[in-house]
């Protein structure tokens, strides 16, 4: 028997038992669908995270001070926070750092007003390098300058949503706005960017960090520090250099944290991989159940068609012909179930993505989790489902091939 004839015979037997074939495929369909949905969720989340980190900026080092770490270490050396002296020391002593911007957030729900218009915004104090490090582009006017920082200037740069909410279509450059009782002049408007991590750059008012320190906070504290190495390949040594500088200046006080966006991204990637393995294991169990179902049905099929097998052998069919026929039949059942499972899983994944985009409109990224289905996952799921059919169909096929033709013809 040729391969094509074996395939034709297998399909004919499946058509003759439509309901049984459909129920046999069900386990494979569920398993493959679970694999496709799992891959879509994990890969979609991974691509979303990469997108968010690209928005934040590339090859960035984050420096912060957490007083809780000092408490956990039970240290008597506790600091109120990172200071501008720390920032200046890093700028002067760390030759592997090419860009530096201290940042001081003072809230995400502060009221800003212009004439009769008002809205809640996030207010950040920054240094001039902030725009380059955080991939922020000025659409109109200019960004914060060194002179603004040195003179504690009451100048601000506003996001696109702030401009639309306070000024509409009117020109905002040179206009005054009230920020929590402090009057400041708008010198720039940012291009629309969307959310970056947990903050919405479009709904932000950016001022010189010294202005925030002197006019809002009252002392030279720094919330966090963004740094960029001269070379992306030198990010590790640059982090070590910053750490050593801070430890030297602050007498090894605990609480300082120096990390990179790349490390954070890799850590999240590892968590997603573990999550994917757990889901993959659950999906594998579904495929295992489906494979056992295929074996059971094929054994029943061998019993039902014992006389047919004997007749085939009597007219010249070889063991390998019988073996090939039943293996192809098992692979056809599981392969067809795999194709249906891929389509069903992809459909569910895209529907879930569309729902997440509606539910998470105001969440991080503002666009939910995208459905990301790489080609390797589709081909892999189909190949694995066909492999399950061959593996679990092997025993029934061998049993059918070993039947004695005389005994098979006597079977009632």
Image (cartoon, rainbow, N blue to C red):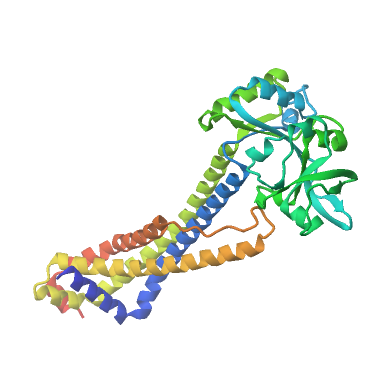
Q: Position of residue 271 (x, y in %)?
A: 55, 45
**Residue 318 versus residue 82 in the image, above or below:** below
Q: Position of residue 38 (x, y in %)?
A: 50, 57
Q: Position of residue 164 (x, y in %)?
A: 76, 57
**Residue 44 versus residue 274 in the image, above or below:** below
Q: Residue at x 9, y 72 (%)?
A: 316
Residue 108 visible somewhere in the drawing? no
6 to the left or right of 198: left
Q: Residue furthest right?
A: 181
**Residue 118 versus residue 155 in the image, above or below:** below
Q: Residue at x 30, y 77 (%)?
A: 14
Q: Nearer the viewer, residue 371 or 402?
A: 371
Q: Position of residue 257 (x, y in %)?
A: 67, 31
The quarter of the displayed image where residue 244 is located: top right
127 to the left or right of 236: right
Q: Nearer the viewer, residue 254 or 291?
A: 254
Quadrant of the snapshot with the N terminus: bottom left
Q: Nearer the viewer, residue 100 or 318?
A: 100
Residue 238 visible somewhere in the drawing? yes
**Residue 301 versus residue 112 in the image, above or below:** below
Q: Residue at x 86, y 53 (%)?
A: 114
């Amino acid at each position: 028997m040729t391969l094509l004839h074996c395939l034709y015979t297998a399909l004919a037997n499946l058509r003759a038992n439509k309901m049984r074939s459909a129920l046999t495929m069900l386990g494979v369909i569920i398993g493959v669908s679970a694999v496709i949905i799992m891959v879509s969720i994990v890969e979609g989340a991974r691509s979303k995270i990469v997108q968010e980190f690209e928005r934040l900026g590339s090859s960035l080092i984050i420096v912060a001070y957490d007083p809780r770490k000092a408490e956990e270490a039970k240290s008597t050396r506790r600091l109120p926070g990172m200071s501008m002296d720390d920032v200046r020391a890093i700028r002067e002593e760390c030759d592997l750092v090419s860009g530096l911007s201290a940042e001081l957030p003072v809230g995400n729900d502060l009221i800003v007003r212009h004439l009769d218009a008002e809205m809640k915004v996030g207010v950040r104090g920054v240094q001039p390098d902030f725009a380059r490090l955080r991939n922020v582009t000025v659409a109109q006017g200019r960004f914060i300058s060194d002179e603004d920082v040195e003179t504690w200037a009451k100048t601000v740069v506003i996001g696109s949503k702030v401009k639309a909410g306070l000024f509409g279509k009117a020109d905002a450059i040179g206009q005054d706005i009230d920020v929590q009782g402090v009057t400041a002049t708008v010198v720039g408007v940012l291009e629309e960017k969307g959310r970056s991590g947990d903050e919405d750059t479009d709904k932000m008012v950016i001022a010189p960090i010294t202005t925030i320190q002197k006019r809002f906070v009252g002392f030279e504290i720094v919330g966090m520090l963004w740094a960029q190495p001269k070379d992306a390949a030198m990010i590790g040594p640059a982090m070590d250099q910053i750490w050593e500088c801070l430890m030297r200046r602050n007498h090894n006080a605990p609480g300082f944290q120096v990390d990179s966006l790349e490390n954070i991204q890799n850590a999240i990637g590892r968590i997603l991989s573990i999550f994917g393995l757990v889901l993959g294991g659950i999906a594998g169990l579904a495929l295992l159940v489906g494979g056992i179902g295929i074996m059971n049905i094929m054994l029943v099929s061998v019993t039902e068609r014992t006389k047919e097998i004997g007749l085939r052998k009597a007219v010249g069919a070889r063991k390998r012909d019988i073996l090939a026929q039943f293996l192809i039949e098992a692979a056809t059942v599981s392969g067809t179930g795999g194709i249906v499972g891929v389509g069903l899983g992809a459909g569910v994944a895209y529907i879930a993505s569309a729902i997440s985009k509606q539910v998470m409109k105001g969440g991080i990224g503002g666009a939910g989790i995208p459905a990301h289905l790489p080609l390797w996952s589709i081909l892999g799921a189909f190949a694995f489902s066909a492999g399950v059919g061959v593996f679990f169909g092997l025993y029934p096929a061998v049993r059918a091939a070993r039947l004695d033709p005389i005994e098979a013809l006597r079977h009632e």
